[in-house]
Image: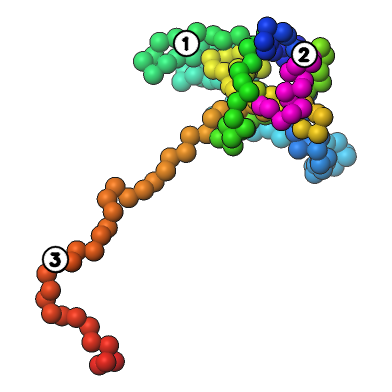
């Protein structure tokens, strides 16, 4: 079982067991299965470009091939910054107390590109924090499920008596507008070539 989400607010810790929420759990799912002549389920696979390796589902998530076709497992990969310097590795936040920020403006959620939603089961919830959440307040904390080279933001909310963590990154909107505004020029040249609608 995964480690719990632990947050602190006002010097008091609260702990939540969590489960990822997906569309299949909400709506169920159907899956079309391809069977071979012996009624056995077929599995998707593909050949590498040179035809020497059969790649099955899930294999590409375990590592990569470099330019010389050497296999590099994910555990050997290192994150680099824009200058090519190694980035520090960030550990998982699960099981580690994270400081809650807030209450924050609920509008922050509208600017969040949500990647994951977790249902939370309180296992030692601070009564003061519970009261704030049930009153509709929103709190923010840093989140990283497996660890890596970057963290995400998680927002702790309560809806209908149930608790959720919405995880993602702020969505940056780029607004496009005219650099200059077009205005009428009353002092423009008048070449006398105006249309006369009576001639139509």
Residue pictured at 61% horizontal, 9% vertical: 91
Do the residues bearing badges 3 and 2 touch, measured as CB atoms within 8 Å? no
Element class at badge 3: loop
Element class at badge 2: loop
What numbered label is drawn on residue 131? Answer: none
Percent position (x, y) of residue 156? 69, 24
Percent position (x, y) of residue 32? 80, 44
Q: Which segment is the magenta one?
A: 125-138
Q: Nearer the viewer, residue 199 or 30?
A: 199
Residue pictured at 54% horizontal, 17% vertical: 150
Q: In 3D space, how far apart are the residues under numbered discs 1 and 3 (Cα atoms)?
A: 61 Å
Q: Split into 4 quadrants, where in the image is the C terminus?
A: bottom left
Q: In 3D space, how far apart are the residues under numbered discs 2 and 1 (Cα atoms)?
A: 36 Å
Which mark is nearer the camera, 2 or 1? Answer: 2
Percent position (x, y) of residue 90? 56, 10
Q: Is residue 132 magenta?
A: yes
Element class at badge 1: loop
Residue pictured at 59% horizontal, 35% vertical: 107
Q: In 3D space, how far apart are the residues under numbered discs 3 and 2 (Cα atoms)?
A: 71 Å
As drawn, which residue projects farthest toward the bottom?
199
The residue where tag 1 is placed is 87
Q: Residues within 10 Å of mark 2 (few under 14, many from 20)?
A: some
The residue where tag 2 is placed is 126
Mark closest to the chain's N terminus, 3 or 2: 2
Q: Is residue 10 magenta?
A: no
Q: Split into 4 quadrants, where in the image is the N terminus?
A: top right
Mark closest to the chain's N terminus, 2 or 1: 1
What numbered label is drawn on residue 187? Answer: 3
Mark closest to the chain's N terminus, 1 or 3: 1
Q: Nearer the viewer, residue 25 or 117?
A: 117
């Amino acid at each position: 079982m995964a480690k719990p989400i632990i947050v602190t607010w006002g010097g008091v810790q609260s702990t939540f067991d969590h489960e990822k929420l997906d569309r299949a759990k909400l709506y169920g799912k159907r899956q079309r299965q391809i069977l071979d002549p012996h009624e056995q389920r077929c599995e998707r696979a593909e050949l590498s470009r040179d035809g020497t390796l059969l790649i099955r589902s899930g294999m590409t998530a375990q590592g990569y091939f470099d330019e010389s076709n050497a296999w590099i497992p994910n555990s050997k990969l290192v994150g680099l910054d824009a200058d090519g310097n190694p980035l520090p590795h960030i550990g998982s936040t699960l099981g580690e107390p994270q400081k809650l920020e807030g209450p924050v403006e609920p509008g922050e959620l509208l600017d969040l590109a949500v990647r994951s939603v977790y249902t939370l089961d309180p296992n030692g919830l601070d009564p003061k924090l519970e009261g704030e959440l049930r009153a509709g307040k929103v709190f923010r904390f840093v989140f990283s499920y497996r660890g890596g080279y970057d963290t995400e933001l998680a927002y702790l909310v309560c809806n209908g008596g149930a608790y959720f963590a919405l995880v993602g990154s702020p969505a940056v909107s780029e607004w496009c507008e005219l650099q200059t505004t077009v205005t009428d020029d009353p002092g423009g040249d008048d070449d006398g070539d105006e249309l006369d609608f009576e001639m139509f």
